[in-house]
Amino acid sequence: MNESSRKNKAAWEFNAYDFWVQHTGRPGDVARKIMADPIRSLRFHASYFKAFQGMRVANICGSCGKKAVPLAALGANVTVFDISESNKKYAMELAESARVSIHYEVCDVMEIDLKKFAASFDVVFMEGGILHYFHDLEKFMGMIRALLKPDGYMICSDFHPLTKIYDVLDFQMPAQSYFSTDVFEGEMPHAKFYDEETRKQFPKCSLRKYTLSEIINAVIGAGFSLRRFDEHPAWTNADLPGEFTILADCRI
């Protein structure tokens, strides 16, 4: 694990379980909401899946399991890859409360064991803003491609690159040049929910934000065929883009 990954692991294991309990809810309560309507829990991402039942899904940086559990409830065989033991603890309690089964691999995504997982998944799914944790996007997309079966596909939903120059999602991060390639230290996304004294204690993450062209070209460069690209309104301002989704498959 490199230094950047060690920083990100320390940040994502600092108070994470308690944060999910306080701001998302106790696993039992959240599980009841998910099981009442699993499709709704997947938000707009549900429409990008071709099927759920029996599909092997790799949920990259799946965090606290809020997407893995509804996928499992819909019949998918889900493996979460995430760097945080604290996230795993919450996710496994959530799955147990929902009475579904998920697999959870705590690891650096760039060090996934390809002897075990290469060409294993029908779908690789990622959402919620993860690309900025990886400093070599081409290598990252290459890893994602390696996990997929020959007829598999990727759903990559992330924060819109507009957030490089304008804090449209209210993450309280400083603006930078749209074309900046700098790696920088930034706060955990949930640090802002704490008082200033607690906030100072949070370990910093190592981040690299990308332009839209860098993201799309990394997808194409990894051997994917781009099938769809959508932009979604920001939850803070419906007149501005806040997220995007790429649907791409392994067919050339």
Image: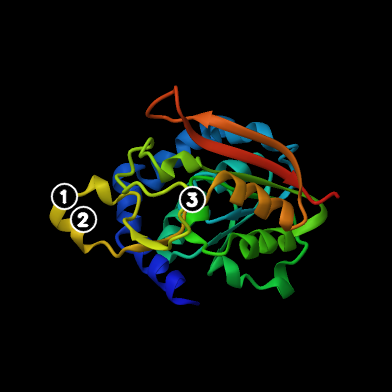
Q: Residues within 10 Å of mark 1 (few under 14, many from 20)?
A: few
**Quarter of the view holding residue 157:** top right
**Quarter of the view holding residue 205:** bottom left
Query: Which numbered disc covers residue 199?
Result: 2
Look at label 1 and name its amino acid: Asp
83 w.r.t. 50: above or below: below
177 w.r.t. 160: above or below: below
For the point 76% across and 61% down, which residue is it? 120
What's the distance in space between the residues labelled 2 and 3, CA to CA?
A: 29 Å
Query: Which numbered disc covers residue 179?
Result: 3
Q: Residues within 10 Å of mark 3 (few under 14, many from 20)?
A: few
Query: Which numbered disc covers residue 8?
Result: none
Q: Which residue is mark 1?
A: 195
Is 156 placed left or right of 150 in the picture? Answer: left
Is 75 placed left or right of 195 in the picture? Answer: right
Earlier in the chain: of badge 3 and badge 1, it is 3
For the point 48% across and 77% down, which residue is it? 2
Quick one: SS at disc 3? loop
- Which color scheme did the rendering employ for the protein? rainbow
Residue 51 percent across, percent down from the top left: 74, 38
Quick one: SS at disc 1? loop
